[in-house]
Amino acid sequence: MPYNKSYGEEKLEKATFAGGCFWCMEAPFEELDGVKEVISGYTGGNKKNPTYEEVSSGKTGHLEAVQVTYDPSKITYKELLNVYWQQIDPTDLIGQFADKGSQYKTAIFYNTEEQRRLAEESKKQLEESGRFDKPIVTGIMKETVFYKAEDYHQDYYKTCPIKYNAYKKGSGREKFIKEKWSDKTLEKTIKYEKPPEAQIKKNLTPMQYKVTQQCGTEPAFNNEYWDNKKEGIYVDVVSGEPLFSSLDKFKSGTGWPSFTKPLEPVNVKEKEDNSLLTKRTEVRSKHGDSHLGHVFEDGPDPTGLRYCINSSALRFIPREDLEKEGYGEFKKLFE
């Protein structure tokens, strides 16, 4: 039967990706914060309720795929695309790694025009990056009915870890991923950008929108990160570009997250702010153009600066999640 589970009042969205054997496509998405469920199944074909044996024959037109249900307020479709590209060989026309056949081809199935736009843009950026010597052949097509695969295929990496690990290694997928993405991140390839206004309103909470888009200020001592002591980095809640590090965070007593310097200075721009009686220096993100806060010259050594930033403008990535979130290049900072 077509798979279409309901989550009541939760505002969740779905993304569907075909990346060869679906056993290897569940884990990378299930471990992401904001992902509610990942289901293995079949889509893109012309037979109702296909079985694994029928799909494996290559005669039904279906592709093995995973359907990802996620909370767009916690993780974006663009971030899911970034994870997807890092799991596959997008240059293979006849399958994936050791698995050959039409059912193992790669494809992105979109369910909205916004998903289509983001998928095509993401593919183009990957093509232009020069990361692959051959053309990117992954298809982008409108979603069709998604059929849930048999129960024994679900969470295979959990139920049969030994067989799963042996398969992932033996198929050549594991080696390929390490060779293509070791010490690299897709964020070096995929550009940070400001999403369309409608998407911003959809993704952000009212306070996040007020702060980042309307230059608002959240309450002191009543925000998410003012007293956060965990190790990790802070990225723009709108664009995802890396902004600050916990290594440069200090207790300022102001009630807002405070940093002595940016993690990536190129991603932070300054602007004169005369909205109050005293002249201040506003801090904005370069690519997302989000209002972040202000910078003052009353900070501690070594810079003497205090970047006073609204929590609502940030998303925190713990050090242990840097690799899977696409910020692996910053892991070395915490070693």
Image (spheres, rainbow, N blue to C red):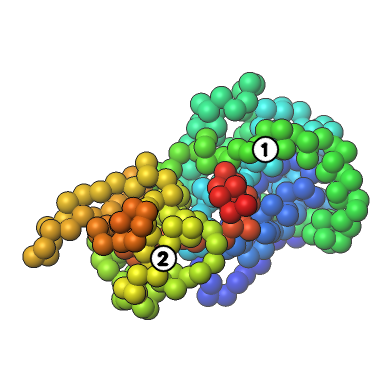
> SS at mark 2?
strand
- Mark 2 or 1: in front is 2
Is 49 in front, or is 100? Answer: 100
Q: The residue under label 2 is which amino acid type?
A: Phe
Name the spot of residue 63 as percent of width and height, x first: 74, 42
User: x and y percent of residue 117 in the render?
Assistant: 46, 41
Q: Residue at x 78, y 36 (%)?
A: 175
Q: Is residue 9 above or below residue 193?
A: below
Instruction: Identify the residue shown where x is 84% and y is 41%.
Output: 169
Total numbered labels:
2
Looking at this view, is 4 or 253 the one in front? Answer: 253
Circle 2 residue: 250
Q: Residue beneath label 1, please? A: 182
**In which quarter of the view is residue 200 placed?**
bottom left
The three-letter code of the residue at mark 1 reads Ser
- Within 10 angstroms of label 2, few (less than 14), some, or many (20 or more) residues? some
Look at 73% across and 49% down and name the residue there.
Answer: 25
